[in-house]
Amino acid sequence: MVLVVSERELLKYDRQIMMPGWGEEGQEKLKRARVVVAGLGGLGTPAVTYLAVAGVGRIRIIDDGTVEIGNLNRQILYSENDLGRKKVDVARERLESLNADIEVEAIGEVITAENVSELVSDYLIVDAMDNLPARYLLNAVALERRLPLFHGAVYGFEGRATTIIPGKTGCLRCLYQGVVPGKTTVVGVAPGVIGCIEAAEVIKYVLGMGELLCDRMLIYDGLAASFSEVRLRRNPQCDACQSAWSAAGQ
């Protein structure tokens, strides 16, 4: 492997490189990784922050929104000075100021059936959206491209996270049915916790470390200060992920 991590970066990431199973080779893998974070709200802002400071080399951020005062209880990349600005512009500036050694590509568009494939490309997918239709679009392109999808969702003081690997796990269509309400209660710490878990799953996937949340839903209850886990099974009647399983010989 040709080295792409500089001496300066080795110093920057010294504390994580020290971890058994990480090392310089692991940091090289992160430097070469390409991750798309779809949604720059309560989930996306902590997730992308920790991916950036960990040294993920190329990050694509997608959000069509502008910073509003109602965002500030949970969307940690923004301040009151940013009100009215495009989220992707503010986020790119903050991320590049946190880590000058990464590339951040900002796309201020709505994710649609027509553009989702081009927007995602061959990047690892962090689902930080706040609506089910957009999540389903990410799910579909993940299945089509055989890309991992790192899913998080929150409500009030609670949150959940799972990792979807096409052909190995169920998909979002297996998990969710019907329509999820658009505007819900959110306490800022909940997406902070879940967004960090999504980032951790991406890092583990890139490095090949630990155990991913495959076929498992991790559930955070902030009021009870507890985590629990639900085992997941693919719905054998799910049309969405049938082709991915067939291609995997399942």
Image: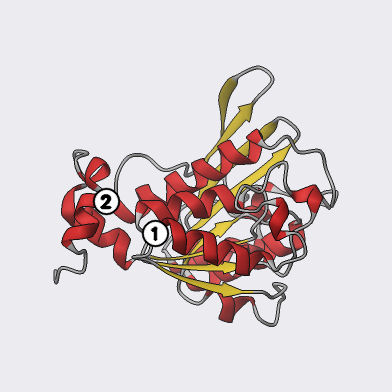
Task: State whether residue 51 is above or below residue 141.
Answer: above
Q: Residue 205's spot in the image, x, y percent?
A: 37, 52
Q: Label 2 neighbourhood size at 10 Å, few (<14), some (14-19), many (20+)? A: some
> Which mark sits nearer the N-terminus, 1 or 2?
2
Q: CA distance from mark 1 to mark 2?
A: 10 Å
Residue that badge 1 annotates: 99
Residue that badge 2 annotates: 12
* Location of the N terminus (image quadrant): bottom left
Q: Is residue 146 left or right of residue 1?
A: right
Q: Residue at x 70, y 68 (%)?
A: 86
Q: Residue at x 77, y 64 (%)?
A: 84
Q: Residue 198's spot in the image, x, y percent?
A: 51, 47
Q: Is residue 101 left or right of residue 159?
A: left
Q: Residue at x 56, y 24 (%)?
A: 227
The numbered disc on residue 236 is none
Task: Kindly indicate whether the residue at mark 2 contacts the one at mark 1 (C-beta within 8 angstroms).
Answer: yes
Task: State whether residue 186 is above or below residue 205.
Answer: above
Task: State whether residue 71 is above or below residue 190.
Answer: below
Q: Residue at x 56, y 45 (%)?
A: 195
Question: Depth check: 179 or 80 in front?
Answer: 80
* Location of the C terminus (image quadrant): bottom left
Q: Is residue 121 left or right of residue 110?
A: left
Whether residue 225 is visible to the viewer of this picture, yes or no, is yes
Q: Where is residue 65, by image quadrant?
A: bottom right
